[in-house]
Amino acid sequence: MAALSVKYQVKDLGHPSQFLGMRIEQSDKGILVSQAAYVGEALHRSAMQPARMQPTPMIPNTRLDEFQDSPPDNEDAEMRRMPYRHVVGSLLYTLKVAWIAAKYLLRYLSGTQTIRLRLAPSSSGIDVVTDADLANNKADRKSVSDCLDYLFAFPVAWSSTKHGVVAQYSTTAELIAANDGLLLAKWIKLVVDEILHQVLPPTKLTLQVDNVPTIHRIKHEGSSGAQKAVDICFRALKDAWKHDDMAIEYIPTEVIPADKLTKSLTSSQLRNKRGSISTRVTIRVVACVGGVEQGN
């Protein structure tokens, strides 16, 4: 608030307690964010209170992209009676397997209502963690990009996106994912620098990937060796690195938090990733006091 008041005329209304369905609690240790009311409302609309809790958000070894054909008439009629659109927001599938997956997700959410995200800024700059799952879609073999963007050591934006082109190699898929993360991070940097330019120096941007060949290609001369659409991503990354608009670092695959956005995980893997997603795991020594914790 003090930083904003340097440039803008603002009125301090005190600490918020509710915002867009989120409950906000503030203390000396940081800010706690939870969505118990929002999740409870979703469960109520779907007639799933009480719900049998599940340890993961996705059914293990189930892929919705394998079900591309139209459902049988009897299954289609059954699904029209289900409140599926209320669960996913729009009617993307009318398949029974997708309805089961949606209910499974709600059961997982019912067990996370008291989990809170603790936000406590502990460093400066923007960190982008990206990952790619090569040939993820069995129908067309297009890969999936995921990225987590951190501002001052806690996550502010994340995405999981299917590629528009087919990547033949893991390095190609990682280049596309890295470019997706960089584009979002640049937008965050523009907003932060515009608001805080009189208070803080320009925000530093660091890209973190788990693919050594990708880092090598960005840092050294040469072409991407890929089709035009991918080569554009490659050139954008190389240009950002050469002009010192970003730094780039390696992050081990086993600790990369963005991995949870590309595939279903076991309950133990999910617990580990859920903890690291809000503590900005890197191979550098970072003092970060944010995290995920159980509420009352």
Image (tube, grey):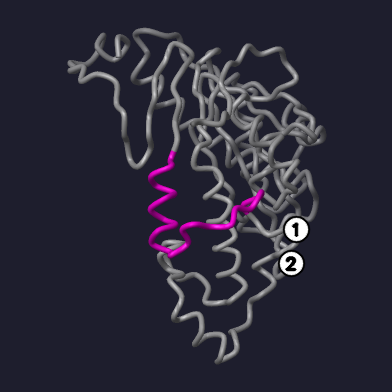
Q: Is residue 2 above or below residue 171?
A: above
Q: Is residue 44 left or right of residue 72?
A: left
For label 2, the crowd category at 10 Å Cα-Cα, with few meaning under 14, some 14 to 19 and many 20 or more, is few
In the image, which disc is placed on residue 135?
Answer: 1
SS for tag 2?
loop
Q: Are circles 1 and 2 on residues that touch, CB within 8 Å?
A: no
Gap between marks 1 and 2, in whole Å? Answer: 7 Å
Q: Position of residue 255 (x, y in %)?
A: 75, 31
Q: Is residue 96 above or below residue 296?
A: below
Examine the image and state in which quarter residue 180 appears.
top right
In the image, which disc is placed on residue 138?
Answer: 2
Magenta-span inclusion, residue 162: no
Q: Is residue 4 above or below residue 72?
A: above
Q: Position of residue 225 (x, y in %)?
A: 77, 46
In which quadrant of the rendered image does the N terminus lie?
top left
Q: Is residue 186 left or right of residue 96?
A: left
Callout 2, which amino acid?
Lys
SS for tag 1?
loop
Examine the image and state in which quarter residue 192 appears.
top left
Callout 1, which amino acid?
Ala
Q: Is residue 284 left or right of residue 86?
A: right
Q: At 45% across and 35% down in the image, what residue appears?
A: 34
Examine the image and state in which quarter residue 73 appears.
bottom right
Q: Position of residue 18 (x, y in %)?
A: 31, 34
For label 1, the crowd category at 10 Å Cα-Cα, with few meaning under 14, some 14 to 19 and many 20 or more, is many
Q: At 26% across and 9% down in the image, what residue appears?
A: 6
In the image, which disc is placed on residue 127?
Answer: none
Region in magenta:
35-57
Name the foreground residue: 156 vs 97: 97
Q: Residue furthest bottom?
A: 73
